[in-house]
Amino acid sequence: MGILSAIHYAVALLRMNLRAAFARPVVALTTAAFMFGNNMIWYLVWVIYFANFSNLRGWVGADLALLLGIVAWAFGLAVLLAGGGRELAQAVADGGLDVHLGRPRHPLPSLLANRSLPSGLGDMASAFVFWLVFAGRGAADLPFLLLVATASSVVVVATMVATQCLAFWLPRAATLCEELFQQFLMVCFYPQHPFGFMARLVLFTVFPAAFVGLLPVEAVRDGDIAKALAIAAGALVYAALAAAIFARGLRRYASGNRLVEWR
């Protein structure tokens, strides 16, 4: 009963915030269209690259399109359903967490679903173009692609939360938190297979971009279920880690002159 109640609560939050995000549909769809165009322009850079070089350490244009599609879906889904996570640091700084702490549920889902970014639709739409047009994948590949890309989205949200939580320990760190997350995204969108062992170790641990970019591409290219399961396991681990960091930081959260502690 408790699990069903939590699911209903999460669905209600998402429905409410999606409705607010698309209250002005023309503005929302224009924002999504601009993001779609931005992704196409970014891919054009790689088209020019592969027109001059046959491959990038074994990767060809189709592999790069596969990567961009997976990351675009992962990021788009993250900001569409959990865009409030990008405002966590600011909420810590200005006392905005009070609203979520006052609700009869864990504050993190409420905070994540507090904002929905329509631009995420543009990212998600561009993913299908990358996969079906530029990567040469077929409709039969979509279930597996959506599975690994959605698992990658959980890693994106977890990293968003973890970086934003630095604000609990570093006052006025909202800008730093956002810059760290942007650096994470930049690495996700860049081919990671040429990196050496130490760099890959970092990308599979403290800066988990490999679970968003490299590993999903390899799983799809090879049709490797084991790698897909590794992505899903990584998503669960990083989600639990992000929740633990948030709970730890919340003990330090101060609203005005009062110490607000959530257990």
Image: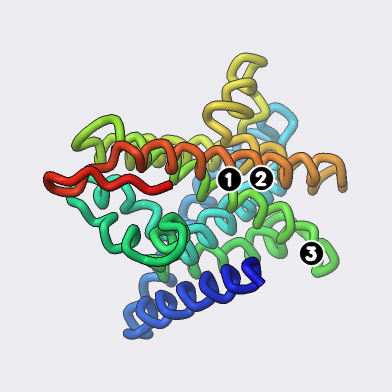
User: Badges 3 and 2: C-beta atoms under 8 Å apart?
Assistant: no
Near mark 3 (Cα within 10 A), the count class, few <14, some 14-19 or many ≥20, is: few
Taking the spot 87% from the left edge, 46% from the top edge, the residue there is 225
Taking the spot 18% from the left edge, 50% from the top edge, the residue there is 94
Figure check: 46 above or below 69: above
State the mark number for residue 143: 3
User: Badges 1 and 2: C-beta atoms under 8 Å apart?
Assistant: yes
Q: Nearer the viewer, residue 178 or 109?
A: 109
Which residue in the structure is indicated by mark 1?
239
Q: Nearer the viewer, residue 156 or 183?
A: 156
Residue 215 on image: x %, y %: 71, 38
Which residue in the structure is indicated by mark 2?
236
Mark 3 or 1: the one toward you = 1
The image quadrant where one finds the N terminus is bottom right
Taking 23 as reference, is 39 left or right?
Answer: right
Residue 237 on image: x %, y %: 64, 39
Q: Nearer the viewer, residue 196 or 250?
A: 250
Secondary structure beneath label 2: helix
Near mark 2 (Cα within 10 A), the count class, few <14, some 14-19 or many ≥20, is: some
Q: CA distance from mark 1 to mark 2?
A: 5 Å
